[in-house]
Image: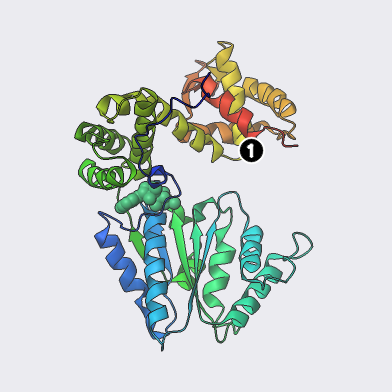
Amino acid sequence: MGSLFEDIDDTIFDDKDVLAEEYQPDEILERDDEIGQYKHTLKDVLFGRNPTNVMLYGKAGVGKTAVTTYVLNELQAEAETRDETSDVHVHRFNCNGETVFSTVRALVNQLLPAHAADFPKRGLSTSDALEEFYSQLERVGGTHLVVFDELDHLEDANTLLYDIPRARAKGDLEDARIGIIGISNNYKFRDRLSSKVRDALNEDEIAFSTYTANELQNILRDRAEKALVDDGFDESAIRLAAALAAKDNGSARQALDLLRKGGEIAERNDDSTVTEHHIDAARDAVRRGRLKDKISDQSTHAQLVLEAMARIENRGDTPARSKEVMSVYQEVAVDREQEPLSTLKSVQNHLSDLTMLGFLTQNQVNEGRGGGVYHEYELDMTPDVVFGTCDELFATTF
Ligand SMILES: Nc1ncnc2c1ncn2[C@@H]1O[C@H](COP(=O)(O)OP(=O)(O)O)[C@@H](O)[C@H]1O
Ligand SMILES: [Mg+2]
């Protein structure tokens, strides 16, 4: 008898990593304008001047992180070749799920010498952490560029964005120089900053537009050539994946997901070329994956409210009023071993946020003469996706 894997001897992928989420392309296509602006903004660093702060805006998957990594790698490499330029240190940090304190703490820990103990988790304040941050920057010296990715996820970015730009003026930094690079999916982010912070930051802004179908085709074709074997894909696959992603959100991430999933489906079917049929078959799985990501991005209580809505939907009891959602939400919280929020108002706030984000639909009901006005909610997706994702998110880890 042969071994279990004996019959597997062929693969459609030459280098599948090229299609992985974390792959950093060494060539960025279709973003010449953004890269040009970036270059112009950061060039001061080469002459030992203070870096200009930068804020990047654009929807998910339009290349903000990839372009930033590329530009900063190039800048660091160039600085190394110039004797007169001081070292450029880059600190990358994703703010998703973080507080201002945990963010600064993490930056301090990245900077501490290898033998030093980590900055304490408890007992010290954000200003203590900032003070330590500045003294570490002084110790290391040179120019520091701090990338705050997904900065809009930080509840109160104001403190951070007010303090750091003023560090030199306040005398917290003398030798070291620091620049902030903020990345946000949310265009409204800047409006939420106080005017005091906006003045302190005085940043350059770079807007990333969504990709057109043509741009996505070029990005995809380049990746497909590197990732798949010769003749491993058909132009029809590139065209369809680009068209679907362009029609939805103009996201390169989504286009690449379709190509990777399409490749996996082709391989499973023993087909030697990825065609539009495989991309078409990949649509459902990719859509589910995107929904999962979107759910994972919500706060814990928003997730619990969403799961409550999924339960109500499953019982066929939608549309439901917020009071009813509240009681199911409390059951869900108990099941998931979370302390439930106690006020109806807080659950109503989550319901309206979830509606705005497209998870739920809401309609307004007038009770007629003398009666009040209230809202009813329905789930705008299949309950299964919600249950599956919440099971993963709340899985007990031993
Ligand atoms: N212009 C581009 N050229 C090549 N790959 C790109 C380009 N833009 C985005 N990508 C790829 O698409 C995916 C999403 O891009 P990313 O930079 O993470 O988006 P964002 O940070 O805006 O959400 C990544 O895998 C990235 O490598
Ligand atoms: Mg990103």
Residue toward you, 171 or 260 = 260
Residue pictured at 22% horizontal, 33% vertical: 234
Residue pictured at 72% horizontal, 66% vertical: 119
Q: In the rendered view, tell whether residue 391 sits above or below residue 198.
A: above
Q: In the rendered view, tell whether residue 364 sits above or below residue 94.
A: above
Residue pictured at 29% horizontal, 42% vertical: 224
Question: How far from the left and from the top, in percent, is residue 216?
Answer: 26, 44
Question: How far from the left and from the top, in percent, is residue 309?
Answer: 58, 23
Res. 228 in view: yes
Would residue 62 be found to the left or right of residue 102 on screen? left
Neighbour tally class for label 1: few under 14, some 14-19, many 20 plus, Cα within 10 Å: some
Where on the picture, by quarter, is residue 181? bottom left
- Which residue bears the numbered disc 1? 300
Q: Quadrant of the C terminus?
A: top right
Res. 321 in view: no
Q: How is the image coloured?
A: rainbow
The residue type indicated by label 1 comes to Thr
Question: How far from the left and from the top, in percent, is residue 299?
Answer: 60, 40
Where on the picture, by quarter, is residue 108? bottom right
Would residue 279 be found to the left or right of residue 111 on screen? left
Residue toward you, 138 or 309 = 138
